[in-house]
Amino acid sequence: MTGPTPAGLALALDDAARAARPIPPLTDAAPLGLAEAYGVQRLATERRCARGESVVGVKMGFTSRAKMAQMGVDDLILGRLTDAMAVEDGGTLDTGGLIHPRIEPEIAFLLGSPLSGRVSPYEAARAVSAVAVAYEVLDSRYQDFRFTLPDVIADNASAAAFGVGPWHDPVDVANLGLVLEIDGRTAETGSSAAVLGHPLRALAAAARLAGTAGTGLEAGWIVLAGAATTAVPLPRRAHVKVASARLGRVEVTTR
Ligand code: 0L1
Ligand code: MG
């Protein structure tokens, strides 16, 4: 007997996201290789695009030791961002359509030129046209946020929503303090240095992993470099702010 096809797995994940109904990890039923998992991610993204969404960038996951330890994995992953996931700065995010959302503070890059393959952080820096403070909302489509590395890759690295603050001309983002506030209370504080020692390393890794994922990083795309802290549960009816002394702030209200 043969197992489910990549298209069947992509459909299961897409349905889970749309219905906000979690499913067991795919690998509970059958093993999944990393390349195969990126194939499922691509197919699930194609389903979104067929409904009218466009890919506007990528996100890097597990870029800090804190995040790897939080989720029990030990490798970097890449997920795709679409325009439907973007929340305008100061806007509202309806968490009603999400399963168990979490939020984390990040640094975002805007690419002025394409980037792919093995590049150094210095080469990656040359492709950056702007930087901003950002947040990512994660929402695993798996029950209890339980998954293996191939599971979470297939699930588009848990990408659900994101927001980006005002863009700034490129500045040194090696060690920027980031504060995540929920309803005026500090929920997490961290430094961009937690992102692989320097967020530009995450950008270089994104260029490398994009090939594995069957894509390349395009000019005009946003790259979320990865979290500076662990992710925290995102409550309903909350006001969330991520602030950096150098890059300003980005805000969102949930309902
Ligand atoms: O760092 C990340 O963005 C990891 C995303 C995937 C794992 C998770 O859902 O926490
Ligand atoms: Mg993230």
Image (cartoon, rainbow, N blue to C red):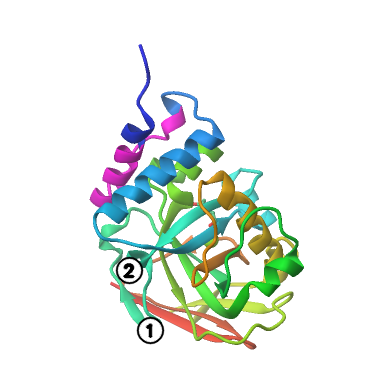
At x 57% / y 58%, what residue is drawn? 60
Residue 132 in percent (x, y) is at: 56, 80
Where 202 sits versus 165, above or below? above
- To which quarter of the image does residue 6 belong? top left
Q: CA distance from mark 2 to mark 1?
A: 16 Å
Residue 137 in percent (x, y) is at: 44, 63
| Mark sitting on residue 236 | 2
Identified by mark 1, the residue type is Gly
Front residue of 226 and 37: 37
Assess disc 2: are there few (<14), some (14-19) or many (≥20) residues with their C-alpha within 10 Å of its C-alpha. some
| Mark sitting on residue 99 | none
Identified by mark 2, the residue type is Arg
Residue 79 in percent (x, y) is at: 49, 53
Residue 180 in percent (x, y) is at: 54, 75
- Write the start and end of the magenta stretch as one range: 10-27
In this picture, residue 15 sits left or right of residue 109: left
